[in-house]
Image (spheres, helix red, strand yellow):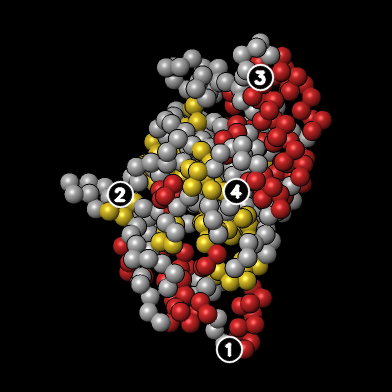
Amino acid sequence: MRKLKVGEWVQVRSKEEILSTLDSKGQLDGMPFMPEMFAFCGKKFQVYKRAHKTCDTVFPIRGRRLDQAVHLDTRCDGSSHGGCQAGCLIFWKLAWLKPHREATLEGRSGVEDDNASEAQSGSRCTEFNVLAQTQSANPNGGEPTYHCQATRLPYATTDLAWWDIRQYFEDYWSGNVGLWQMVCGAVYSRYYALSRAGIGLGRPMQWFYDKFYPLWRGTPFPRKTGTIPEGQPTPAERLDLRPGELVQVKPYAEILKTLNTSNQNRGLYWDAEEVVYCDGTYRVLKSVTKIIDEKTGKMQEMKTPCIVLESAVCQSRYSECRMFCPRSIYAYFREIWLERVETGTSSSEGTEDKLPKTHLMSIETLRSPKSGSRLANRNSKGTV
């Protein structure tokens, strides 16, 4: 299949067709097909992003190249991985999809394509094999080690240097990133590098950025440091937020007062990628209490639940080593970073009208799969 662009329609192949593409470990080119993905077989989706690159959150965070894959409007529900609540955006290899037009013609003619025929002629993998690969038992009787697309990502990808300019051309031509977003990203990357060059320009450049960022419809300088000394306790607030409630993300300056000098609040890292959501109004998607740690494969129980908001995902606007990564990991918020918005209606319609222009641009750019993803604050050290 040719490379797909954002917005194109595809149909997920049948279970039998997909199984025929997998090896005995339930993988294709090292990428696992997870049991949660069977629920999407036969359904039609638009391409959300071309997954020609991604970020590795297993080893030191870095960019990685991926071949023949896209993201659809689909996320993992964790049902076969111990109830993990991360809601990762799923990787779909092109061999697991067919163009919508092709699927329609097949339905009218009643003739299967070559891949479908091959699927009927003996698969090397079964549904049981796919399910069996989701975890490994602990020989000492402890918690199992889980395996999923996120934990196996380094082994299904290859190195991608940030300075490889070909990736940025593909970002644009695939529809992943708009031209203005690319320009802003490039300018910020060089600006930030110069501010850290050790030639005494850091403070004045940060002042200039904060003074004039409205001119390019941006955010305040996104890499400021929290105010609480390392080792001192950080504050907490309990709102008991529920899915569907409206909240407003507090101003950046207020959030900085809740962070230590490592930019953490009780172990949860506040990342530059979250700054774009400050002052915006969003609907609570869910509360997260457990996720799989990609580095270890172990289930990680959170001491304090984190909040995920609709459409609030990592856009990789300020992440120089993985600029414009399309993985769209959910941002995790502490309740102290949010304020409940009192409203007399339960409808989400009109919510976006209340957002600043910057946030409207972000949401239209993302339109994240009714979902979002584990943002850079999930990719950083520290217990949560």
Residue shown at the point (38%, 75%) measured from the top left = 123
Residue shown at the point (34%, 57%) measured from the top left = 134
Label 3 to label 1, Cα distance in Å?
62 Å
Count of number-bearing discs? 4
3 or 2: mark nearer the eye: 3
Classify mark 2: helix, strand or loop.
strand
Q: Residue 55: tell me if it is visible.
A: no
Please give the residue where the numbered disc 4 appears in the rendered image: 326
Query: 75 left or right of 210?
Result: left
Percent x, y for residue 260? 50, 20
1 or 2: mark nearer the eye: 1
Classify mark 3: helix, strand or loop.
helix
Q: Nearer the viewer, residue 377 or 159?
A: 159
As drawn, 145 above or below 220: below
Crowd rating for badge 2 (residues with CA inside 10 Å; few <14, some 14–19, many 20+): some
Residue shown at the point (50%, 43%) measured from the top left = 159
Please give the residue where the numbered disc 1 appears in the rendered image: 110
- Give the amino acid type for the residue marked by disc 2 in the picture: Thr
Label 1 to label 4, Cα distance in Å?
36 Å
Say whether disc 1 or disc 4 marks the residue closer to the N-terminus. 1
Label 1 to label 2, Cα distance in Å?
44 Å
Crowd rating for badge 1 (residues with CA inside 10 Å; few <14, some 14–19, many 20+): few
Please give the residue where the numbered disc 2 appears in the rendered image: 145
